[in-house]
Image: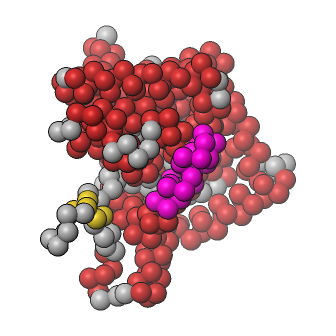
Amino acid sequence: MTDVVPQASVTTANTSQVEPKRLRSPFERFGLTGRPLRTVNWLGVVAGVYVLITAVELIGSGFKAATGDTAESLFAFASNPFVALMVGVLFTAATQSSSTTTSVTVGLVAGGLPIQIAIPMLMGANIGTTLTNTLVSLGMVRDRESFRRAFSAATVHDFFNLLAVAIFLPLELAFGLLERVSGWLAGASSGADGGIVATLFAAIGTVVDTVTEPLANLLEAGTSFLPDPWHGVLMIVLGIGLILGVINWLGRLLKVLMVGKAAQMLHSSVGRGPISGVASGAAVTMMVQSSSTTTSLMIPLAGSGTFSLKQVYPFTVGANIGTTVTALIAAFAFTGAEGEVALQAAFVHVMFNVFAALVIFGMPLLRQVPLRGAVWLGDVAAANKLWAAAWVLGVFVGVPMALIGLTVLL
């Protein structure tokens, strides 16, 4: 879930070959090895998911306590969709985790944040999450040709997500496309007439809510010494802190458990064609629960020439789809009317990435735009490293902060 950069490679003392640094479980310090260690690692993952869902529920309750019936007016500054988009970009770039942004947003929507504000924020999370693999590519800056390939492979993800927003944000503003589709899916998955799917989702939600409610109530009671709205604000801060910590925890454990298998899948499927690349990108990201981890795994391989830009491209598209699972898990923190709007926010993230893959990657003319943009940017960045710095600072920091600042001043 956490967007964590893969471990760096190290050179052994007895050979000049570069070997990957062994990933270590935090439980190894207790002397565990083999099957007991693996069992405890999986129990740690279960505990992490439990805390994640509890933290999302805490954010929803905190937001409701902090705002009462004024949630929409509190976020009036983000009623401008471009500002909401930039909030999503900045928050994701700062936390280096789109999973954190989407989980927090799901909690806020359950607590009263209007879905119209949440949609651009979720789109912004897609842009912000591409910063990690772009930064990874800067590690190859000393070798001009390797850097050119690596930076192009990293920024093809940037260009794809920017193009997706450029297409779907205007469609959303004009027709409410994502709001309508996600609302229908949420209703079909949680309504009384939703059939077996709604029954299954309701059962899962009820079980999860019952299991997580004791810890959520304990944390809520522990912060009740403050009056509203500060009680709610503290709950939100505590919830975000828990999400940041637990996503990092899950990332460490899942990397130990799954990265080896993920790397095998990556090597066996990426070069077999675009459909295989998209599917493997989605599958690997679901396995390690981090789009930045999976896309960052590709950057050294692209820089070395092992995979071409055209092979990396569909993999990153699939990673966008795979990372949406986190928001769906977070939505099960709620039931009833809250559960339906939380599920709608999660489906927004899912459908945005699915539609983007179908429209951009499915249309030959649009499919070439991110490729050409990445090749051009890779060439100019390799010729002058200042272009790389300008791209990173401008796209992920300068433009978002400037737009938010202008909106506040005006």
Tell me where residue 165 appears, x and y as whole percent.
Answer: 50, 25
243 left or right, relative to 356: left
Range covered by the magenta-colored residues: 262-285
- Any part of residue 207 in sight: yes
Give the vertical position of 33 relative to 273 (above or below).
Answer: below
Q: The N terminus lies in which quarter of the figure? A: bottom left
- Residue at left 73%, top 50%? 190
From the image, give the main secondary structure of the stretch colored magenta: helix
- Residue at left 38%, top 48%? 301
Q: Residue furthest left?
A: 13
Tell me where residue 287 appears, x and y as whole percent.
Answer: 52, 60
Q: Quadrant of residue 11?
A: bottom left
- Residue at left 32%, top 27%? 378
Q: Nearer the viewer, residue 397 or 11?
A: 11
Tell me where residue 46 appears, x and y as whole percent.
Answer: 50, 71
Q: Quadrant of residue 96?
A: top left
- Residue at left 32%, top 18%? 403
Based on the picture, tell me whether residue 245 belongs to the magenta stretch.
no
Q: The C terminus lies in which quarter of the figure? A: top left
Based on the picture, tell me whether residue 269 belongs to the magenta stretch.
yes
